[in-house]
Image: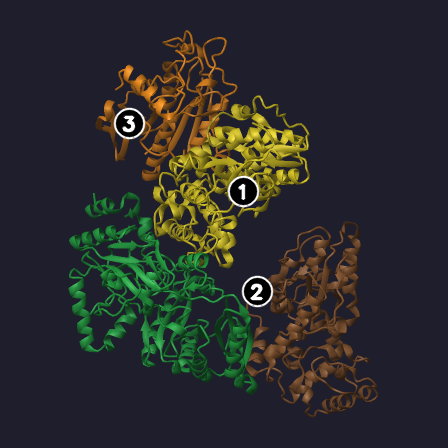
Amino acid sequence: MDIIACIKRVPDTSEADFIKIDPAQRDIEKDRLAFKINNWDEYALEAAVQLKEKLGGTLTAITVGPEDWNEVLRRALAMGADNAIRIDRDVSADDAYTVAVILERVIQRLSYDLVLFGAQSEDFGSGQLGAMVAEMLGIPHATLVTVLEAEEGKVHTQRELEAGTLQSYTIELPALLTVHTGINQPRYISLRGIRSAMQKELQVMALDDPGLSPETLVPMVKLEKLELPPKGKEAELIAGAPEEAAERLAKILKDAGIF
Amino acid sequence: MYELKFNEDECLSCTTQDCLTRCQYMDIDRDTAKAEILKIAHGEDSFVLHDCVTCYACEEYCPVNNHPFYLIVEKQEELDVPPLPRPLIRRGIQTGIPFRGEPDIEEINGQALDMGVFSDLMYLIQGRLFEGLPVISQDPRKMFHYFCQLMYLHYGRTSVIKERLPGIIQTIAKHNVTEVICFHDECYGTYTSYCPAVGIDVPFKAVHLFEFLYNRLNELKDDINPINLKVAYQRPCSSRLSSDKHHFVRGIFELIGAENVEREYVDENALCCGGTIQGQRREGSRKRAADVQKRNIEDMKNAGAEVCVFNCPACYTTLGSMVAKNGIRPVFMSDLCRLAIGEKPAGWR
Amino acid sequence: MDSVYQALVDIVGQEHVSNRQEELFIYSYDLGTTEPHRPDYAVIPRTTEEIQEIVKLANKEKVPVVPLGGGLSLAGLAVPFRGGIALDLKRMDSILEVNEKARYAVVECGVSQGQLTSYLERNFPHLTHSEPGAPPTATIAGNVAIHGQGDLAQPYGFNSDMVNGLEIVLPTGEVCKFGSCSIGSGWYTQHPLPDVGLFLGWSGTTGIITKVSIRLFPSKKIRGVGQFVVEDEELVPEIMYKLTHTQMTEDVIAFSQAIPPFASGLQHFTINIVADSEKELEFKHEIVWDDTLGEYIRSGAGGFLGFRSGLQRPQVSKTSDWRKGGGFEYVGAIMPVETYPECYRRGRDISERHDIPYTVLGRCIGAAHAMMFSWTYAFNRADPETIRQAREALHETDDLALELHGTIWKPGLYGQKLVMERLDPNTLNLMKKIKQMLDPNGIMNPGNWEVS
Amino acid sequence: MTLTDYKYGDVIHRCFRCGYCKFPINWMDVNNCPAYARFRMETYSCGGRLWLTRAWLEGEIEWSDHLADILYSCTACKNCEVKCPLSFNIDILNMMIAAKGEMVERGEVPSPVKEFLENIQRQGNPYGTSRAKRGEWMEGTGIEAYQGQEFLYYVGCVGSYDTRGQETARILGKVLQKAGVSFGVLGNDENCDGNEVKNLGEETLFEMLAEENVAQFQGLGVQKIVTLSPHSYNTMKNDYPGFNGEFEVSHYTQLLQGLIRDGGLDVSGGYNATVTYHDPCFLGRWNEEYNAPRAVLKSTPGVQLVEMARNKDGALCCGGGGGNFYIDLLGGSADSPARRRVREACETGANVLAVACPNCLTMLEDAVKAEGLEDKLAVKDIAEIVGEACGIK
C-alpha cells in the first residue's frame, strides 16, 4: 500500500503567557518559540508507518513550507517514511484553500492508495485542509478517524463524534482520512534516528514544479487581524486555612451554579 | 638442576654460630649449633630440622651469607622432615597453580611495579606515590603467573620453587621490564637472594618497595606533613632476605615524621607473625603461635605504639585484626606514606 | 474478561495480580535446571484471609495453586507444572513476635532468613536462629517446609525440628493452627498434642504455611570459624564423630572442590566455634584443635588453618558464576556420615564424566546422626548443552544417593519418583489418602508428591 | 537487535536472581530496590528485569507497554550494583540502560518517557517549559551571569523550573553570596545536564547535551563547577571528561563543608531541629559522598542528626531517579518508595528530613503530603537549613 502523509510545522505554544502578537497583527511573534511537528500529524504519520510496517508499500511525507520546515520531514523520515517532499513556500499568509490547491497538484502526480492528514492543526485549527484536498482529488474521505484497519483495496475506520459516539465506515481506496489523536501511540524518535534521517534525500519543489505560480494562488479567505483575547476579571487566589479555603471554594462553585 | 651454593667450610670456621644461637624459637648454645649445622650440611637428621619455625631469620644472622635457612629447608625435603602436615603442604602447592587462563603481556620497556600474587591489593598502590608507574600482575585471576613461589620455604619444598620459578621469571621478563619494583619483599628476596643462591638467572633488576617509597617521598618532600604517630613495624620473615634494605624502614619513618617506638622485638629481634607457626606439625604449634603473637603485641603496646605498620599482606591477615583489637591501628607502609603527603590511606581502619 | 483474573483482582487488588507475559515468564522459571512452565496468574497476597479466598477460588475453578517464598529451592519445587496461580508469599513479611525468654520468633511466611537475622542482631543480639546456606532472601517458612538445615544443625538438628507452631491455610481454605498456639497458649511448642504434622516436607502440596514459630538459640559474643584440612577422605567420618563428641562446635562442614585448585583432592573442614569470652574461646580451641584434632596434626594427616572471628554468611550465589553462566543446582541428600568417602569419590566421578568441576559438601546434622551431603553442578544458562549435562548429572546423583542408603532432600520430580518407588507401600498409600482428604481437587502444587 | 548484538549479550545470563540486589544496608528486608518495593512482583527486581531483558532480546517474550514500564521503573539508584556479590555487578545497571537504549531506538518507550525526551530535545528540560524561562528562578536575587568568576553555579532543570527546586536554587545562591564565593550562572543559556537522559537510554541525545555543555563551559573559560543537583554533579564529574570536559566539579554540600570548616560561612544562627538525612543516590552510591552533607549538618548549631536504619549505601532511593521524578512510574501507592522513605524518616523521631537533591526534595515533600505527615515532618534541602543558620530568609 502506498501512503501519503501531509504534515506541518507549528510553534510550541504550550505556554500561553509567551504568545505575543506581532506588530502587523497577522501572526504571533515566533523568535522566542520552539517548533515541532503538528500534534495531529504525528498521529497520522504513526498510523501511516504502522500500516506500512504491516502491509509493505511506500510512505511519502509532504509538507508545504519554507526551509526550516525540513525538520518535520526529517522526523517523518526517521519514523519510517521513504520519501519526503517539501514545496517551498512561505505559508504564513495562506489560507487552507491555497495550501489545498498546492497539495492537490503534488499528490495527483504521485501514485497512492491512501492519503493521511492530521485532523487539524495546533496553530490555526481550521480542520479544513484534508477534506478540501479529498474533494479536489475526487476521492472519498473520512475525518476524525480514531480506528484504522486496512485490507486489500479498502480501509475500515471509525470516527469519534460528540460524547464518544463512534461511526464505522468501510471505504474503498484510494481515499483520504484525517486522523484524530488517540488512534495510536506515536513512537519516540531518537536523536540518532533524526541524525541518520539527515543522510536521507529530501525533495524540494518550487511552486512551478507542479505548474503553479504565486499569481494563480488566490486565497478564498483573508486574515484581517490576529489578537489576544481581552483579559478577563482577575483570578481570585483563595488564602487561609484549608478548612476556610475549602468553604470559600464551595461557596463560589455553588454560587456559579456548578453544584 | 639448580643447586644451593653452600660452603661447609664457612660454618667450620665460623666463630659465632649466630644462625642458630640467635634463633628466637630454639635455645641452642654455640657448640650444639655448630654440631647441628654440620650434621644438616652432611645430610643427617637434626632436631633443628624438626623444630625450625621457618622464620627465615638465620639467613640474616649468618655473618657470611652462607644461606643456613635455605640449607635447612633443602634438607627438610631431602630427609622428609616436613615442617607442616601433609595436607597443608599439598594445599599450599596447589594454591600456586594458575587456573584462569594466560596473562596478557604488555610490554613496559622500563620500570614497573610487580604486584606478584597480590593483585587484589591494587587499592594500596594509588595516589601520587605511584602515579605514572606501570603495573604488572593487575588481574587477580592471572596473578599466580607472577607468584614468586618463595612461600614454599615454609613448606619444606624448594623443589617446587626451583621447578616453577624460572617460568615465572620468564613471564615477568616478557614484559620487558628493566627494573621490577616488588610490591612484596618476598619477591624482592627471591630475585636478589634466593635466585643467586641457587643459580637461577634473573634478567631484570629488582627494586625493594621501601627503597622506591623512600625515593618517592624525597621527591615529594615539600608535600610531607609529619604524621606524628608512634609506630611499630611488623617485620616479615621475607625481609630477612633483604636485610640491606631494612634501613629504609627507619629512613621512611624519619621522612614522614613517624616515631619508631623503642621495643624489644625490633629489627633483628623481630618476631614472626605466627601465621606459619600455628599450622606446623609439631606438638603445641597453635599455642606457640598464640604465644609469639601475644608477646609481640604486648611489646608494641608497652612501647606505646599507636600504629602497627605492615610490609607483608600475610602478616597483615594474621595480625591485623589482633593488633586492632588491642587498640593499635594496622596499616600498610605505603598507606602510612600516603597519610604523610595528605592523601587518604586506602586501607586505614 | 477472564473471570478467574477478575476474581483474583477482587481479592488482592489489581496491582497484586498479573496475567501478563512478563510476570508469567518470570514465575515460570526455577533458578535450577527444571524446565519452565508458565502459570496463568501471578498473585502476591498480603494476608491469610486473602490466601483463604484465593484457595477457595482455586477449588471452585479447579485451578492449581503453587506457593513460593524465596523461590530458591533450585529443585523446581515452585514451578507451576500444570499452570494455575503462582502464589508469591513475600509480601507476608511481618515478624510478629520475638519471645526473648522462651527463645522463639513468630513470623509470617514471607519473612526472609536475612530479615530475621538482621532483626535479631539489632534487637536481640544474644539470640540467633539457624541460618541455612541459601541466600538470605530465602524464607523461614519455605526452609522449614522443605526440612532445611542451617548453621545450628550440628547442635540442634533440622530447621524443621525447630518449629514451635504453624498456621496453615488448608487446600480447601480453612485456617488451622498447630502446637501450643492452637489452644491459645502462645507459640512456644509444637508438642505434646496429637501429632498432625502433615505440612513439613510435602513441598506445599498439603497446605500453605502462613505463620511459623521458630526456635531461637543463644548467640554468643564471639562467633568464628576455624579450618582444618585432611587429605584422606576416609578420615572425615571419624573426625566428625570426634568433633561432635566435644559438644563445643556449632557447625561442622567438610567440603572438597576442583576449583580453586588449592581445594582439589583435599577435604576441608569449617568448624564454627562460639564463646562469650576469650577464656571460653581458648578453652574450646584447646579441646577442639589440640586435644581432639592434635593427633592428626602430629601424624601429619591433618592441618590446622587457623581461626577467624566473625561469621561470614556463605555467598552461595557465587557458585552460579563458576561457569560464567548464572546457574547451578545441587542434589542434597541426608546421608549416614560414614558414607562421606564414597559420596565424595562417586560424586567426583559423576562430575568428571559430565565435564563439570566437582563440588561436594557434607554438613553434620546433630551429633553426627546424619549429614546433609550436597553435590553441586554449575551450568551456563546461555548454553543448553551444559544445562542438559547438569540435569543428567543431577539425576545420576539422585540414583547414587539412594544407592548409598541416603534419603534425597527436597527432591525434584525425578527424585520424588525414585523415592516413591522405594517407599513402603503402606506409607505411600497413606500419603495418597492424606492428599485426597486434604486436597480433594488436587489443586496444591500439582506434579509434586503425586502418588499414582 | 538480537542478543548477539546487545552489548551485554555475553554476560546478562549470568544473573542467578539470588536477590542480593534487593537488600538495604544489611538483610533487614528485601525492599531496597525502589521498583521492587513498589510492586513486589519478581519482574520488578533487578534480577527480574535482567531476565526479562534477556527473554525479550532472545524473542521469548514480545515487547509490550508493561515490559517498557518495568524497565523504566528502574531508577538507576545503583542499589543492585552495590549489593550484587558477583563480579559482573559493575555492569548490571549498564545492562538495564542498554536495554532502555534499545527501546529508545525502536521508539518503543512509555509515553511519559517520550514526552520527557522530546521536551529535552525541544526545550532543554523535561518539563517542556520554554528555554527562555530557564533563568526566571533568579529574578531579584542579584545573582550574576557567569563571566569568568571562580565558580559556575550550575542549577539544573529541577532547580530552574520546579517551584520548590527554584526556592532551593535561590537560597543556595544567597548562601554562596553571603560566603563571598565568586560565582555566576548561565540563566537562560543553561541547558539540561543529560544525566537522566543517559539513564533513560537516549545515548545520542546525552552525547549531544554533553558536547554542547562542554563546549559552552570551555567557551566561557569555566574551570570550577558547583552544582545544586547531585545528578548534574555525577554526569559532569564522571561523564564529561569523556567529552574532553575536565572541570573541577563539586556538589554544593562539598563546597559548603569547606566554607563552614574554614570559617568562610557563619552558621552560628543555627537551626534547631532533629534532622535525619536522606542520601541522594547520585551523591551517595554513585559517588560515595556520604560525609560532606552530614558534616554540614553536624556543624550547624542546633541540628541533632539522627540516622535512618537505611543510610549511606543502604539508603532507599526516593523513587525519582532514572527520570522517575517526571515519568512517575513508581507513584500512586503507599508502597511508593518516597512514601516508604518518609515513613522511615518519621520513625527516627526527626522533625526535619534533610535532602541534598532537588529531585529528592520534591519527591519526598509530595510523599509527606500523601502520608499526611505535614505536622510531623518537614522536608528541607540542606541549602535551606544552612540558609536559615546563616540568617537568610
Residue C445 visible in the snapshot: no
Question: In the rendered image of this protein, which colour is used for chain C?
Answer: green
Of tags 2 and 3, the one toward the viewer is 2
Chain identifier matching the yellow colour in the rendered picture: D
Name the foreground residue: A246 vs B137. A246
Q: Chain of mark 2?
A: B
Name the foreground residue: D199 vs B312. B312
Q: Chain of mark 1?
A: D
Of tags 1 and 2, the one toward the viewer is 1
Q: CA distance from mark 1 to mark 2?
A: 47 Å
The amino acid type of the residue labelled 2 equals Arg
The amino acid type of the residue labelled 3 equals Val
The x, y position of residue A102, in whole percent, is: 39, 18
The x, y position of residue D237, in whole percent, is: 60, 42
Q: CA distance from mark 2 to mark 3?
A: 63 Å
Of tags 1 and 3, the one toward the viewer is 1
Residue drawn at (41%, 53%) of the image: D29
Residue B341 visible in the snapshot: yes
Q: Residues within 10 Å of mark 2 (few under 14, many from 20)?
A: some
Q: Chain of mark 3?
A: A
Q: Which mark is residue D326?
A: none
Q: Which mark is residue D304?
A: 1
Question: In the rendered image of this protein, which colour is used for chain A?
Answer: orange
**Drawn side of residue D380 relative to residue A171, left or right:** right
Q: Residues within 10 Å of mark 1 (few under 14, many from 20)?
A: some
Q: Residue furthest top?
A: A224
- Residue under label 2: B141
Q: CA distance from mark 1 to mark 3?
A: 63 Å
